[in-house]
Amino acid sequence: MAIDLDAIRRKLGDLQSQTTRTSHLWKPSPGKNQVRIVPYQYNKDNPFQELFFHYDLGKKNYLSPVTFGEADPVVEFSEKLKATGNSDDWKLSKKLEPKMRTYVPVLVRGAEGEGVKLWGFGKQVYTELLGFITDPDYGDITDPSSGRDIVVEFTPSEGAGSYPKTTIRVKPNQTAATTDKNIADKIMTGQEDIFNIFKKVSYDDLKQALEEWLDPSTDGEQPAGDLPWETNNQQKTATPAPAAAAATSKVKSTDDISAAFDDLFNQ
């Protein structure tokens, strides 16, 4: 029996992607951590990179095309569900909307030699950080010459039904991000592009993933152009009740998507 080279290549790609994520993403350890936000090499005007994800769609997470201002078939399906006027469809549509997670480049104090890492967080931490930056008492805490370090305190989840908790505190003293030339070089030219870590997915591939999630029995046999809410004459209608009901049961456990991301990254 000949080996399936395509399957081997896919597995190799998955493993390489996991290695890239592990080496370039940062998650706080339990207790207090100290980091410094630095300029993002690939967008000097803004270190905060807003990415949108579909969480747990067929046991996988997908980067939404919304991230790039492009059409997203899952969002289109969500809008169709809203239009039915059915309360269960509306709840499902909200759960299918892409959820934002923000990433920012940081130097981790005590591990500066490892270079710049990308720290991901949800809306609450993002809002707090922007609040500090816009507060004249703090100013631009990301400035490499006169910014401020951040203390990140992480509390792991305490069991089923609970989620990790992250709190931040900005240090009062203004300091340089580093005085080491080698580390400064890593800040300026040694960062990983966030989109090398989270790969862009094509419209058709995401459409196929949604179809298989709604109706696993298709097993990828239906063309990517046909979705459960589309009729044979291509007039779009609401999703059939069985598909909607199955989908609703799949997403009940993801009420707090941001917290679920935190739980996933800190397991």
Image: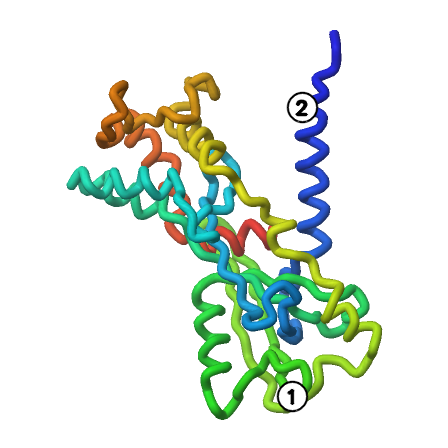
Between the C-alphas of marks 1 and 2, the distance is 50 Å
Please provide percent x and percent y for residue 62: 50, 42
Return the mark for residue 7: 2
Which quadrant of the figure contains the N terminus? top right
Q: Circles 1 and 2: CB distance less than 8 Å?
A: no
- Within the image, what quadrant is residue 35 found in? bottom right
| Along the viewing direction, whichever of 100 and 223 lies nearer the viewer | 223
Q: Amino acid at mark 1?
A: Ser
Q: What secondary structure is marked by label 1? A: loop
Q: Which residue occupies the foreground of this view, 6 or 109?
A: 6
* Quarter of image, res 2: top right
Vertical side of 160 occupied by 8: above or below:
above
Observer able to see residue 87: yes
Above or below 106: residue 205: above
Sooner in the amino-acid sequence: mark 1 or mark 2: 2
Question: Dot 2, how many residues are within 10 Å of its Cα: few (below 14), some (14-19), or many (20+)?
Answer: few
Name the residue carrying label 1: 146
